Image (cartoon, rainbow, N blue to C red):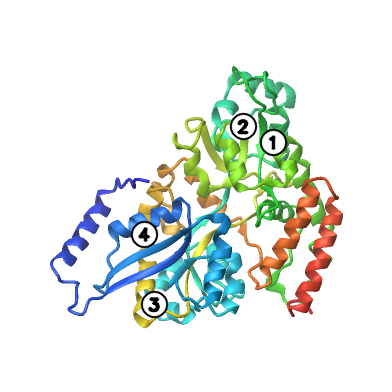
Amino acid sequence: MRVSLPFGGLLATTAVATMVVATGLATPAHAENVTIRMAVPDWPPTRIMKQLADEFYQAPSGNTVTLEPDFIPWPDYQNRLSASLTSGEQRYHMAVSDSQWLGQFIEGGYYKNLTDIIAADPELQAIFDDLNQNLVDAYSTYPHKTENYYGFPQMPDVLITYYREDVFCNEAEAAAFNSQYGYDLPCTPEEMNDVDWDMVRDFGEFFQRTAGDELAGATLDDDFFGIAYQAGKGYDFSSMQINAFVWQHGGNIWDETQAPTGQAEGVVNSEMSVKGFEHYLSLLEYMPPVVQTGSMDIFKVDELFRAGKVAWIIQWIGFAESAISADTSTVHDQVNFAMAPGLRKDDGSLDRTSNIGGQPFVLTTWLTETEEQEAIDFVKWWLSEETQLRFVQAGGQSGLQSVYTQPEYNTFRPWNHAFGPSLDWQKDVWHVPDFMELLIQQQEEFDKAITGQQDAKTTLDNIAEFQQELLTDSGLIE
């Protein structure tokens, strides 16, 4: 991906820095060649990071520092990172880690505690002061929401709405929708930002068409569907969306910040949690039939939308670039974006509580003094306002409030207006070492409900019972 850099001031600053290094003023006689090997998932935000590092990064030490990412496909990433860390090979100096893995790899002795380093470094303290607090809680702290810090945001990510503007803004479709439902079909992002789950149900019903039907003035040659969101059995692909419904209905998952007195039974399967899960399940009938197989993961949602099969989806903001690229999307010139929907409250406002995505940087525990300092300096460069603006201009996101609140931010990509306001609604799933066991069992149970094998209450009862026993055995529940 080519990086667009319209800000002359940023280029001028870089040019000055380059001249200083070129004249030898910043290069000590003992300069070294240092390679930072980093495990990263293979997707645009990490590819952009590598390109920016190669083009712009100059270590303040005067050393020649090269970022060497190991790009690993997402489906294999956790397994391969875990295999490397636990093997003793000590291959990586840094990793881009899902926040959920913090407890497992911290307790295993692989991720470095950065608390003292941050406390001694005013630049890092300033960065943390500038970060949205929900990102600090999710990406940096372990135990969760304590003042023990292990990570820095690499790519903040949130779930947002992608929709077919040509379909939602079509006059004939709008007139038919209004006649059937008694309110206007949203067209602009501002209108789509006020969508609640009842409206999503209507979108799903209204836009469900079969081959040969008319849609926005054209005859369909294939079936078409109104809505889609994550409902996949793999990894966390249903949990990420189900958690939002549970939280918005006033329910909860097991809350690790309440350990050891916080319970799973009576919380995970509370009446409100069941109601939220039932709401999630009720919308599946309006989705493409692949949802019935338990394979509606984030990649399938993305694929169906880019192929022009769905009118409206919820997807991670990190996938948005592929939706507007002519190389990857058949609807690239017909897409617009908005915040994810929410549950309408009595006062008319929306509860948009959602499960945060994205990943932090972490440092491993076996770095030499030089490697550690170079890794920290790289993080400070990455989280500088100048670099973050470049990242955003290239399609990434920034968790720095000083960056995402700038008026220019929303002009860089058509989805950026949905990012900043979404951050304040973000919560996270567990970070404890038992995360993967909790997740695997939960995903299997969710899949039974998604594929029609059992009801919502039975599902959450089974999950609550399993979690109560596992977490009690682990000492996380008394």
Residue 348: which numbered mark, if any? none
Residue 385: which numbered mark, if any? 4
Instruction: Give the CA distance from mark 1 to mark 3.
Output: 48 Å
**Percent position of residue 313, x then y:** 62, 40
| Mark 1 surroundings within 10 Å by alpha-carbon count, few (fewer than 14), some (14 through 19), many (20 or more) | many
**Percent position of residue 431, x then y:** 63, 69
Between discs 4 and 1, the one toward the N terminus: 1
Q: Secondary structure at mark 4?
A: helix
Between discs 4 and 2, the one toward the N terminus: 2
The amino acid at mark 3 is: Glu
Q: Disc 2 marks which residue?
A: 309
Residue 288: which numbered mark, if any? 1
Asked if the residues shown at circle 3 and circle 4 are in contact, with their CB atoms under 8 angstroms apart, the answer is no
Q: Is residue 244 left or right of residue 71?
A: right
Q: Secondary structure at mark 2?
A: loop
Instruction: Give the CA distance from mark 3 to mark 2.
Output: 48 Å
Q: Disc 3 marks which residue?
A: 372
Instruction: Give the CA distance from mark 1 to mark 2.
Output: 8 Å
**Percent position of residue 138, x then y:** 57, 65
Instruction: Give the CA distance from mark 3 to mark 4.
Output: 22 Å
The amino acid at mark 1 is: Pro
Which numbered disc, 4 or 2, marks the residue closer to the eye? 2
Which numbered disc, 3 or 4, marks the residue closer to the eye? 3
